[in-house]
Amino acid sequence: MPGGDNAILVTEFLEHSLQYRRLLMRLPPGPSGGRERLLDAMASLLVDLHRGGVYWGDCSLANTLFRRDGDRIQAYLVDAETSESHDRLSDGQREYDLEVLVENVAFGLADLAAFARRDDPTGQDYDDAIREAESVQSRYRQLWEELHAEVELAPGDRYAVEARVRRLNELGFAIDEIELEPGPGGRLRFRVAVTTRRFHARELERRTGLVVLEGQAKILMNDLRQYRSWLEWFEVRPIDRAEGARRWLAEVFRPTTARLAAVVGPDRDIIQSYCDVLEHKWLLSEQAGRDVGLETAVRSYLESGAPAPEIGPDLAAEQAAERPSDLL
């Protein structure tokens, strides 16, 4: 408080989030898409914190909550007891945080492997845990370099500038400013400053008013664009963005999410459930060799039991058989 030594920390309940054990316990041993997405989320979280001048000090799976976000996973810091906030972190602070992350993540994964095998843990389990933890460090460095790289290009090479901007947008980052400075040999040194990772989320909110996570927004934006293109073909006339967004909401998104909510439940993540239906539609279409349509995908998804969107289809199949002690 001002003028004193006391402070109040106000926290927010993170809806639809899970601990890492709940996400990983029912995955098969060894590499999998779910494990890869979780490790990507840990690396991305630490990059975001370091960009904001936050030194974590105790990076670990146990101090993190995870939430499904479209076809990816988002990670959230939930224990900031050892954290420090600075205007900017030194390379030494970032490196030490990375060392702590590798050690703690390796311990968390090894502990999970030992629990899963119970009476028969193997040395390979621990080796795999260390390897996966070290991969988070590699993922962190790759993303950090992507965001802070200085690229040299020929004067007038607008394609290279656009390609770099598109790449960062694909990662979810909006561009705050672009800097071009004279470089050696008549070339230009090009670097960008990026904002928070909500490029697609802001665009979707601007068009539809929906407030969702970045990965979800990317999937929904693609669905909106596809529906608008279909309308133009079917009605043989141009459809502007405003009309396309309005009709997608009224004719596709809202009716579908209402059907899902009636089965999945209003307390579930309905946006993620809709994203899962779109993924289900893609898989069914691949099997059929043609577009099966949204109605078929929704019906099939509901007949399969409408898997809990926070867990995801891969894990929900075994959800009914889980014992409460397995999820602690």
Image (spheres, grey):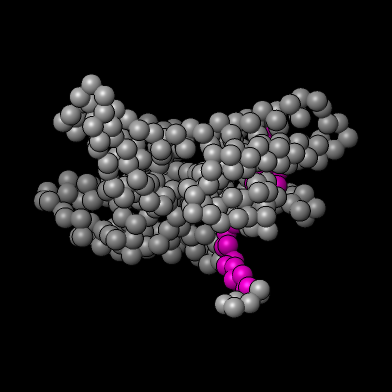
Residue 14 is covered by the magenta coloring: yes
Q: Is residue 148 above or below residue 53?
A: above
Q: Position of residue 130 (x, y in %)?
A: 70, 30
* Name of the residue lying farthest toward the front: 3
Residue at point 28% right, 60% down? Answer: 207
Q: Is residue 129 above or below residue 207?
A: above
> Can I make out residue 296 in this image?
no
Residue at point 35% right, 45% down? Answer: 193
* Name of the residue lying farthest toward the top: 185
Q: Position of residue 252 (x, y in %)?
A: 33, 57
Residue 183 is covered by the magenta coloring: no
Q: Position of residue 105 (x, y in %)?
A: 68, 40
Residue range highlighted in magenta: 7-29
**Quarter of the image holding residue 247?**
bottom left
| Magenta segment main secondary structure | loop
* Name of the residue lying farthest toward the right: 119
Q: Is residue 17 left or right of residue 249?
A: right
**Residue 108 or 261: which is nearer the viewer?**
108
Q: Is residue 300 left or right of residue 125?
A: left
**Residue 180 or 119: which is nearer the viewer?**
180
Image mark count: 0
Q: Is residue 122 left or right of residue 298?
A: right
**Residue 305 or 97: which is nearer the viewer?**
97
> Can I make out residue 145 in this image?
yes
Residue at point 67% right, 55% down? Answer: 82
Residue at point 66% right, 74% down? Answer: 6
**Quarter of the image holding residue 41?**
top right
Position of the N terminus, as image quadrant, is: bottom right
Q: Position of residue 287 (x, y in %)?
A: 44, 32
